[in-house]
Image (cartoon, helix red, strand yellow):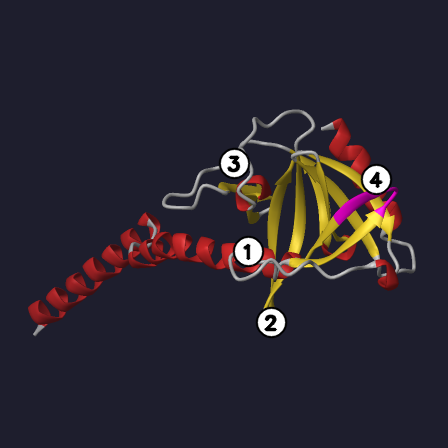
Amino acid sequence: MEMAGQAQNVVDGTAQMDDNDQYLTFILAEEEYGVDILCVQEIRGWENATPLPNSPPHVKGVINLRGSIVPLIDLRLCFNMPATEYSALTVVIVMRVQTGDETRIVGIIADAVSDVYSIEPGEMRPAPDLGQSVNTDFIKSIVSVDNKMVMLLEIDRLLNFDSNQIEQVLAPEQAETEDNPPLAQSNDATSDSQTDDQDDASQQAQA
């Protein structure tokens, strides 16, 4: 939790800088990846999530974030990397993902937070063409920082499909809730029906 708190302080301070080309980087399997810092809402330590039935392996469940239900996506599993146990260094990067006209909140799980870099557009290089067998649509660009390669992710494209999957998983549960109203509402409806029956019987007796 302390590591996540320090990273959050860095994000809060950097977000005030007058430059849109700020990227928060994080570690996955000893490789460094980056996301646009303007999409980052907050950074948290790992916490147990509530599993979702029939969800893919990389969707680790959902957490309640101040009243909002936030799905957690393990990027290691998204990238077909070996799974690893979550530790005190594991972080959840809560991000705002744009899907059409709607903004969704999604948490991505990473091994650790690395740094925040200011990157000029001229430093970015397109992702290599690996053919149809490898989908690189979610890779925005690749940059060299301090003699290491950092892959910048197009987070909206990467998480858009997962968000749609999660909606499909949640839809049957939401429909079931609508078809079965809360007990208090059912009791109220029963009480109103009984009152109407009593009024009808009273009117017939008076007639």
Q: Quadrant of the C terminus?
A: bottom left
Contact, CB < 8 Å: mark 3 with mark 4?
Answer: no
Q: Nearer the viewer, mark 1 or mark 2?
A: 1
Q: Is residue 101 magenta?
A: no
Q: Is residue 149 magenta?
A: yes
Could you tell me the amino acid type at mark 1? Val
**Which element is circle 1 on?**
loop
Q: Quadrant of the N terminus?
A: top right
| Residue highlighted by disc 1 | 134
Query: Is residue 199 shown to the viewer in this render?
Result: yes
Q: What is the magenta range?
A: 145-150
Could you tell me the amino acid type at mark 3? Ala
Question: 59 and 48: which one is in front?
Answer: 59
| Residue highlighted by disc 4 | 9
Residue 12 picture location, percent across and down: 84, 46
- Asked if residue 119 is positioned above or below residue 50 in the image, the reply reads below
Residue 197 picture location, percent across and down: 15, 63
Q: How far is the residue under mark 3 from the one under mark 2?
A: 28 Å
Could you tell me the amino acid type at mark 4? Asn
Q: How far is the residue under mark 3 from the one under mark 1?
A: 30 Å
Q: Which of marks 4 and 1 precedes in the sequence?
A: 4
| Residue highlighted by disc 3 | 49
